Image: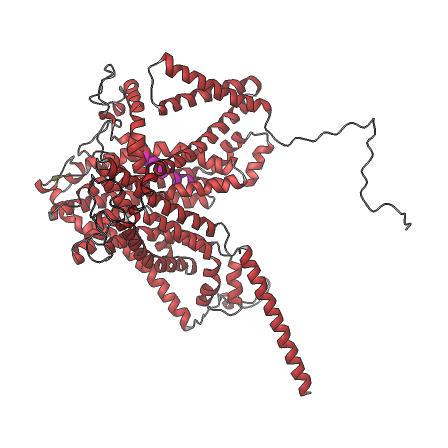
Amino acid sequence: MAVLSPEKSPGDAVDAASDEPIAVIVNRDRSDKTFRLIAITSGVAVLVIMSMVGVFLALRGSQALGVAGWGFLTTQAWEPDSGNFGIAAVIVGTILIASVAICVAIPLALGMALFISEYAKGWLRSSLVSLVDLMAAVPSVIYGLWGFFFLQGQMIPVARWISTYFGWIPLFAVDGSDPSDPLSTATVFTSSTFIAGIVVGFMVMPITSSVMREVFTQAPVGEREGAFALGATRWGMIRTVVLPFGRGGIIGGTMLGLGRALGETIAVYMIISIVFYIQPHLLQNGASSVSSLIALRYGESTALGLSALMAAGLALFLMTLVVNFFASIIVSRSRSGAAS
Amino acid sequence: MTTTTTARTTVNPEPTDDAPLQQRVRLSQVRMSDIFALGGAAVASLCLTGLLYTTLTPFSSAIGFGFVWYAFFIGLYAILTVFDETSQAVRDRLAGVVIRSLAIFVVGVLVFVIGFTLSKGWEVLTYLNFFSDDMSNAGPLDPLIYGGVLHAVVGTLIEIAIALAIVIPLGVMVAVYLSEMPGALSRLVRTIVEAMTALPSIVAGLFVYATLIMIFTKQQSGFAAAIAISIMMLPIIIRSADVALRLVPSTLKEASYALGAGQWSTVKNVTLPTAKSGLATAIILGTARGIGETSPVLLCAGFTAALNVNPFQGPMISLPLATFEFVKSPEPTMIARGFGTALVLLLLVLIMFIIARYFGGKGPGALSKRQTKARQRQSEKDAERMTAARATSTSTMTAEK
């Protein structure tokens, strides 16, 4: 399509004016023009749809935001009809669940990514890659079932143990549990941030792991072999070449996972029992998240109640958008090799 | 040059008594001591943890047992390798063991999640009415011979079909746009699409609820849920289709342009057919994600116990939402139905995943054995046709002379 100008040697005494780039005129026939028009239209359409999500949530939520004012960010209650509502509790709850999830996901994702890129060979490697993909494709409701019917019962003794020995750390304290009383109820340990976070952690592990693996496999072969030639062990090579090179991928993958964890709805909704005050005790019954608040209250009949939910949805949307935006910038930078 | 008559076959040298016996070099890096250290640490830590759990301390729970065992295992393995390795090698061994065990753990979790659903839901699937009935005539207390999830299966299929009818043309077109027309606008579209891949599904549902349902239809419907699912799937499919299109070798496209083809005919005849398997994988994996989404359906399509085949009227349930509603009930039969529904959903996703892997196992433009043979036959036929044409043309030319 491009027209190449005839090559000139540097010493050629051709007048400088002809050095200007030759205007490339492309004559497109009708089918090409139609194709380009449709392609651009669909691109713009997607742009419009995606921005409409934010705009409409903002429009619909503006009524509630007007009623609540800045208190929307600081109030720990959800009684829209009496005008007393805010997202302080649910936002903190969402972040707590996502943090637990990330703490679970990082070591697993890192181990899996390193194993696939550095240890596994041949058929094992390719089947593990598809296994991680499959793990991402398993519906969240199935993770929720597993978390609610299996993991919860298994984690109660663990939660009890942590609260008994590390209860002096405020995060792990549990009100209403008495370590010296063996007959004390176990229900204070159910439906907690901790259990929801673990389940969400398993759900976001695949995306984190596949981003990390992609970046790890791009670590330059020359530097790898150089490390081996200098007598490094495999772990020495990983520590000095793969991990520093893949730092962007580790951070970006973690943030992508965080974005997913913030928005996860149904598995969280199945496990937690929602509360509307800031509940910093990870192991204790009662947790909250924006998405489960929406799932719980979308049937609100009043206009203000719905508007308040839209505002909460907008807050969640902006939060995941910002996290994901920075994550994709970091990942794309590290892919282009800028991290080395 | 003298020619000597030597044997034209390879002759093995006769083994002589004084030659040193050659031994095969072992290329494997695994030594017996490694295996002993690993096995010994595993057994020793198992015994130690068993002792701790059964007699010494009042610990309980299988997960706790696993953690304690693993901690002991790592410690003992470190001690055992310290005996005959340098400190660097010990660190290497430990890192290797930790990384391998993390990978095994992840695989174990996946197998366990799938196996748990399978074991709990299998029994329900043996009742055939589970696939042919809906829940309109079955209460929570009815045994499993009544009721089924036909309404959820049909709802899922209708919703995903509508969503795919929107997403496939639009998504592939946008992906083509991104790869064919680089520029400021397409860079913006790509950035937005990348950022939107993490759009929480409940926000997509809320958006459709706020616009389509509250402004236009005023009621929940399968169509609204399909729109919400499309909004959620669109960025995912665009992104992976874009990756598939970028893998098409530019030499193929340039060859097409060099032959005088325009942009559209290059896209139609070269780019899309070459990226076919990658695009199919992108679409199938996106569909698997869309099928499993619960929250948009919860908000937009609502709950119903009866079969509804009209996507524009009334609530229409899907498999994940049915699972969710079933297990909310305290009745054991309803929970069993929930697991059965989850298993149907899981099998659907697994089948789609296997199909996607079957398509996506090949690189862009790679052919299967049958396709290669078909292509060979085609080219042989072409060659025959051409020689025949040449023969007739030369014969007519000679006849004219």
- What span is colored magenta in the figure? A199-210
Q: A302 above or below B19?
A: below
Q: Which residue is drawn at 45% across and 17% down?
A: B47
* B32 horizontally vs B99: left or right: right
Task: Residue at 29%, 25% (x, y): give it.
Answer: A156
Which residue is situated farthest in the bottom direction here?
B401
Residue B394 appears left or right of B75 = right
Examine the image and state in which quarter residue A333 appears: top left
B56 or A19: which is nearer to us? B56
Residue situated in front as seen by the camera: B56 or A295: B56
Q: In this view, does A328 lie to the left or right of A282?
A: right
The picture places residue B270, in percent across and down from the top left corner, at: 49, 63
Q: Is residue A170 above or below residue A90?
A: above
Q: Position of residue A77 (x, y in %)?
A: 14, 36
Q: Measured from the top left, where is residue B246 in percent x and y?
A: 46, 54
Examine the image and state in which quarter residue B65 appears.
top left
Asked whether B297 falls inside the magenta stretch, the response is no
Q: Give the residue at x 17% y 36%.
A: A74
